Amino acid sequence: MLWSLLKILLFVIVVAALAFGAGLLMESRAGLQLSVGNWEFTMGPLQAVIVALILLLLVWTALRVVGFLVALVRFANGDETALSRYFNRNRERKGFQALADGMMALASGDGREAMVKAARAERLLHRPELTNLLTAQAAEMAGDTKMAVAVYKRLLRDDRTRFVGVRGLMKQKLAEGDTATALELAKRAFALKPTHQEVQDILLRLQAEKADWSGARETLSAKLRQGNLPRDVYKRRDAVLALSEAREVLTEGNSIEAREAAIEANRLSPDLIPAAIMAARGYIEQKKPRYASRVLKKAWEAQPHPDLAAAFAEIQPDEDAAHRLKRFRELTSIAPYHPETRMLLAELNIAAEDFPAARTALANLTEIDPTARNLTLMAAIERGQGADDSVVRGYLTRALTAPRGPQWICDNCGTVHANWAPTCAQCGGFDTLSWKSATSDGAPMPHATEMLPLIVGATPLQEQAPDEDADDAEIVGDKAGI
């Protein structure tokens, strides 16, 4: 209603302005005199303006006629679309203008307006390869998923837009959580355009989630060939996939193939801890302890880890504590000041009942970097050296609430995992788990109560202790949940 009133008011203003201008021209004494041969024409100002407008109209008409004659000549010479192009030129201009307006609306985030402009452009242009994509993206922005899916399916009919349609449907299925269908669509998109980096990444992630390790390795190789992945990153991720493939083969009972795959994974990335452990155990099964030792030492050099030490112990499982301590010098001499090395030495000396050496190995680690593990080791050392139970329980009490220390943590979402895995269970990220300490870790150790009788010999509540010890025992009991 308001717009109608504004249009009427604007019309009245324009008419009034024209009438006022015409009155001024009629009152003016100036004029226009034309001489052509023996003919002479004298016109007033208003007449001159009218003649000028008529001349402009005649020139425009002449140009249109000339354009029509040119199109007619081209049609006569065999150009069958010359006349249709001539008559459709204005329609195309309006159609492309609507298409441009739709793209601007899409860029500004107005999905509904973009859909309206796309529909207008389709009516004027009849060019679905141009307008369907705009319509699909506008429908996605407006939240109309049914319309978006229908348009993407129409794009599948044309070879020029088939990839766009498959990619759009794939993203729709990912948004819906239908990863099985999304995987099949990703494979189709990859077959249509194997150089597309986004499709490569999505396909690789979905193949890893579905445990299609061989397919994921092929996709990874394609990323390397297309230059979308540095070679060092490729070697690392290929090793992760090879290790995952080895685990799957081992689950199926093919131990020989699994061992070979694990050795291959370790060759590709010697610093990959799970691959080194699996390869070392493969060598142990083959009665090749020297190879197993070499693999574990190389991995320890890259990143000391307790699972590496456990695998190193499996090389000679029946040795006594003294011989084990001597043999482990090959490992502990590689990174002697690393916290993991120091805790390993403390554990070995505790097993050998050399508690002063265990204390020396641990040094001031419980003060500069207290964790549940090194505090528990210190409690064992104090117990072994005959310290009061209150001292032992003091360390245990601190251990219950101390940080866990390094764990398998996702670099993307920060989720803590009990064991290494090729993909994050929370965000689905591939090869994102790193052995590191959490930024804020106040969680108690699992099975905290189980370490009390193992080290002290009995739970504090079962002992008859002085009042101070009883208070400490009550604290430990409260922390442990007993």
Image: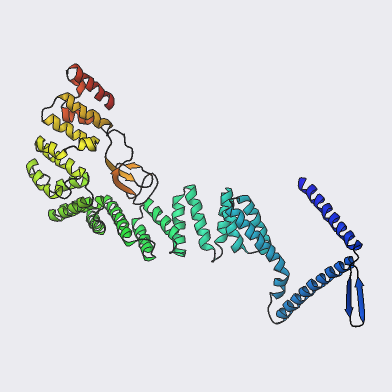
Which residue does the image show at 63% across and 64% down from the upper left? 127
Which residue does the image show at 30% across and 54% down from the upper left? 240
Taking 113 as reference, is 266 left or right?
left
Taking 317 as reference, is 94 left or right?
right
Q: Can you see residue 420?
A: no
* Quadrant of the rendering where the N terminus is positioned: top right
Which residue does the image show at 88% across and 62% down from the upper left? 25
Which residue does the image show at 32% across and 48% down from the upper left? 433
Taking 158 as reference, is 40 left or right?
right
Nearer to me, 187 or 390? 390
| Numbered circles on residues, count | 0
* Quadrant of the rendering where the C terminus is positioned: top left
Type of colouring: rainbow
**With respect to residue 142, does 447 lie above or below?**
above
Q: Can you see residue 244?
A: yes
Q: Locate residue 263, reporting x and y percent.
A: 22, 57
**With respect to residue 250, does 125 lie above or below?**
below
Which residue, as the protein is rendered here, is positioned at the far top? 467
Nearer to me, 446 or 358? 358
Q: Locate residue 325, reporting x and y percent.
A: 10, 44
Q: Locate residue 158, reporting x and y percent.
A: 56, 65
- Quadrant of the image occupied by residue 307: top left
**With respect to residue 335, does 86 lie above or below?**
below
Q: Locate residue 343, reporting x and y percent.
A: 18, 40
- Quadrant of the image occupied by residue 135: bottom right
**With respect to residue 46, does 302 lie above or below?**
above
